[in-house]
Amino acid sequence: MTTDERSLVWAELERATRDRDHPFRQPVILSIDDSGFPSGRVLTLRAADPASRSLRFHIDTRSPKYSHWSQRPLISAVFYDQQARWQLRVRGAATLHNQNEIARAAWLASHPMCQRTYLSQSPPGLEIDWDSPVFPPGLERRRPTGQEAEAAYPNFAVLLLTVAEFDSLHLSGEGHRRFLIAENPHSVRRLAP
Ligand SMILES: Cc1cc2nc3c(=O)[nH]c(=O)nc-3n(C[C@H](O)[C@H](O)[C@H](O)COP(=O)(O)O)c2cc1C
């Protein structure tokens, strides 16, 4: 059972990238802000690759979190599946990709409505007027053309979380089970829950 835990974790993460309703689809991801505070937010899991030990997310280069990981590439994540009573905590290193091969491939594979997010006129987190529109005029209610979306590409970044370790906790009436999975080199150890 214990040695299978790593395969179980990666299989579930991969499943979450294909199933929009999967509870692992939208984890809480943490950075460290400029004052040293932990800073968490929900991000959508886009890809999970056990071979490179990486989880992929998409973020805006103008957002505070981009600046956090540029300065301190430490990253944690918490996934939770309420029905399975399964908590998965992840620690690792953050790598940012902007206007390179990795970013381009992810951008081209993104839906136009997702690309539209990066056309927002103000950087995420900036205070804006009550009546100021979010998107450029004309794009409030439709998907952008390829040419229109291209203007947003410089604002788009891929965030890769290279996993160092998972802490996997299964709640059970018969006794909770908790495992520490190190990724490099691989090892699975049982922990007291
Ligand atoms: C369900 C859900 C999914 C989200 N997915 C993303 C995402 O994939 N990328 C992203 O940048 N923000 C996403 N957000 C918004 C972030 O949680 C956050 O509010 C925003 O990115 C600003 O973060 P920051 O101020 O920490 O930089 C999502 C929010 C929710 C509620």
Image: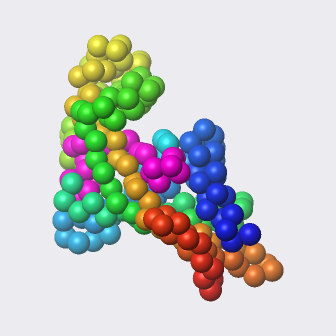
Query: How is the rendered protein coloured?
Result: rainbow
Q: 54 or 23, which lies in front?
A: 54
66 falls in the magenta region: yes
Q: 67 or 96, which lies in front?
A: 96
Residue extending farthest front: 185
Please state the total of marks drawn on the protein image: 0
130 falls in the magenta region: no
Residue 103 image-quadrant placement: top left
| Location of residue 62 with respect to 146 vertically, above or below | below
Residue 23 seen in the figure:
no
| Location of residue 1 with respect to 71 vertically, above or below | below
Residue 54 seen in the figure:
yes
Asked whether, in this view, residue 81 is left or right of residue 46, the answer is: right
| Location of residue 21 with respect to 173 vertically, above or below | above
Residue extending farthest right: 174
Q: Residue at x 48, y 67 (%)?
A: 185
Asked whether, in this view, residue 157 is left or right of residue 179, the answer is: left
Asked whether, in this view, residue 147 is left or right of residue 76, the answer is: left
- On the image, the x and y values in percent for residue 5 come to 66, 65
Q: Residue at x 19, y 59 (%)?
A: 71
Q: Residue at x 56, y 71 (%)?
A: 187
Q: Which segment is the magenta one?
A: 48-69
Q: Residue at x 27, y 71 (%)?
A: 37
Q: Quadrant of the N terminus?
A: bottom right
Residue extending farthest bottom: 192
| Location of residue 32 with respect to 148 vertically, above or below | below
Q: Quadrant of the C terminus?
A: bottom right
Q: 64 or 66, which lies in front?
A: 66
Residue 114 image-quadrant placement: top left
- On the image, the x and y values in percent for residue 66 come to 25, 50
- On the image, the x and y values in percent for residue 142 come to 41, 18
